[in-house]
């Protein structure tokens, strides 16, 4: 989506890791592809943030440590605009609002869990949602992250009874409660905006919905 001397913005397909996992070092990832791409320039990628393997959409990498640190400061300060489209079961009420939780990462189960605000291991998770379109038994949401915790939208939607279509990890009850077939969580990072870390100009990018997401939308509209 964008490349200059300092950074790259990519539209990641679902099914590809953003960065290698310690337990899956040989699994394909955006990071490993960028390593090969930048090698002739004697450069390498530096991680700024990441999105889940089965989430599609926008992710940014730096080309040098100084840019990486400047970008990370923006993310820590909650400055970048990060908007997602999510297909969830049910119809959120109200049709717009804020989800605010305290989450803790369970290292054994590798999932986020809700915890008490005074838990020293916990961290605040905040996002803002609005219903974009409603279907018979599902809704299309736009979700704007204020914080960027791992799996944040997936767990916060589930906590409110609106599991993402295709979700495998953050689920509750029998599969019969989730009858819409989709091979991954229906989540797409469609908008990313931030200040360029070197020249200060405003940058904004939007990634079109991938084919599988569009096909799922078409199915829902004809249910």
Image (cartoon, rainbow, N blue to C red):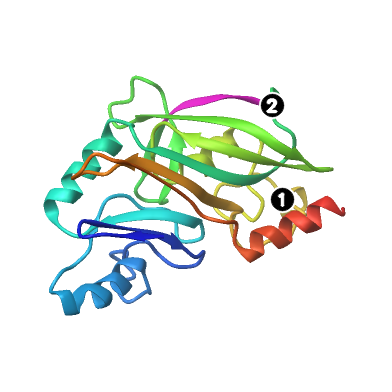
Part of the protein shown in magenta? 95-102
User: As displayed, is residue 52 above or below residue 212?
Assistant: above
Q: Position of residue 153 (x, y in %)?
A: 51, 40
Disc ID at residue 174 = 1
Give yes or no for residue 19 being in the magenta stretch. no
Position in image of residue 94 (x %, y %): 69, 22
Q: Which one is in front in this view, the residue at disc 2 or the one at disc 1?
A: 2
The residue sitting at 63% across, 25% down in the picture is: 96
| Residue 71 against residue 94 in the figure, above or below | below
What is the quadrant of residue 193 in the picture? Answer: top left
Q: Could you tell me how far apart the alpha carbons at marks 2 and 1 are, in whole angstroms? A: 27 Å
Q: Using the image as rendered, state which of residue 157 and residue 107 is in the foreground.
A: 157
Please tell me whether the stretch drawn in magenta is mainly helix, strand or loop. strand
Relative image position of residue 146 (x, y in whole percent): 42, 31
Which residue is depicted at the point 42% across and 53% down? Answer: 51
Secondary structure beneath label 1: loop
Residue 121 rendering spot, x and y as whole percentages: 29, 32
Question: In the rendered structure, which disc, 2 or 1, sits on the residue that comes first in sequence?
Answer: 2
Residue occupied by mark 2: 95
């Amino acid at each position: 989506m964008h490349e200059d001397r300092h950074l790259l913005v990519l539209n990641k397909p679902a099914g590809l890791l953003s960065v290698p996992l310690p337990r899956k070092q040989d699994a394909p990832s955006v990071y490993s592809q960028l390593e090969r791409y930048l090698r002739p320039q004697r450069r390498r990628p530096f991680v700024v943030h990441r999105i889940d393997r089965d989430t599609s959409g926008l992710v940014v990498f730096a080309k040098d440590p100084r840019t990486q640190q400047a970008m990370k400061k923006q993310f820590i300060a909650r400055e970048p605009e990060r908007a997602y489209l999510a297909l969830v079961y049910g119809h959120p009420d109200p049709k717009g609002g804020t989800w605010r939780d305290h989450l803790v990462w369970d290292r054994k189960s590798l999932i986020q869990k809700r915890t008490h605000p005074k838990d020293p291991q916990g961290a605040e998770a905040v996002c803002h949602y609005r219903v974009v379109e409603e279907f018979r038994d599902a809704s299309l949401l736009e979700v704007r992250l204020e914080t960027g915790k791992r799996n944040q939208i997936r767990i916060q939607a589930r906590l409110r009874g609106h599991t993402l279509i295709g979700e495998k990890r953050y689920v509750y009850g029998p599969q019969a409660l989730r009858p819409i077939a989709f091979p991954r969580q229906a989540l797409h990072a469609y908008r990313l905006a931030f200040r360029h870390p070197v020249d200060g100009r405003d940058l904004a990018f939007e990634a079109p919905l991938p084919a599988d997401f569009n096909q799922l939308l078409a199915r829902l509209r004809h249910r």
